[in-house]
Amino acid sequence: MRAGDPACVALAVNLIEARLMTSYAGYARERLARALQSAALSADQAARLSAHFLDLLERGERTAEFRAYLK
């Protein structure tokens, strides 16, 4: 993502939305959310992430990547 690769950005958005529950998955999602802060997101990707984190907020789930997203 640091090189601005749109495919990497798309994969990061998909992985954050998938919310896989494996070892270190929360840590990985947090790192991806931090990396996405400086990435160029399409309007669709930004809307999808906003909807995803709004859903987490409404359900009361505050995960590590939620903190990174708020920044």
Image: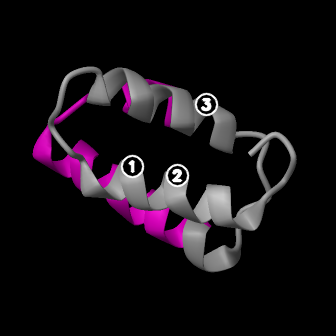
Residues at marks 2 and 1 touching, judged by CB atoms closer than 8 Å: yes
Give the CA separation, mark 2 to mark 1: 6 Å
Query: Please, what secondary structure does the residue beneath circle 1 have?
Result: helix
Instruction: Say if 64 sits above or below 7 in the image.
Output: above
Mark 2 vs mark 3, foreground winner is: 2
The x and y percentages for residue 12 are 52, 52
User: For residue 16, which numbered disc appears in the image?
Assistant: 1
Tag 2: Cα neighbours inside 10 Å, few (<14), some, or many (≥20)?
A: many
Give the CA separation, mark 3 to mark 1: 11 Å
Please report whichever mark, 3 or 1, sits nearer to the chain's N-terminal start.
1
Residue at 30%, 26% (x, y): give it: 26
The residue that mark 3 highlights is 34
Query: Residue 18 falls in which quadrant of the image?
Result: bottom left
| Three-letter amino acid code of the residue under disc 2 | Ala
Q: What is the quadrant of the C terminus in the image?
A: top right
The residue that mark 2 highlights is 12
The x and y percentages for residue 30 are 45, 28
The x and y percentages for residue 48 are 46, 69
Residues at marks 2 and 3 touching, judged by CB atoms closer than 8 Å: no
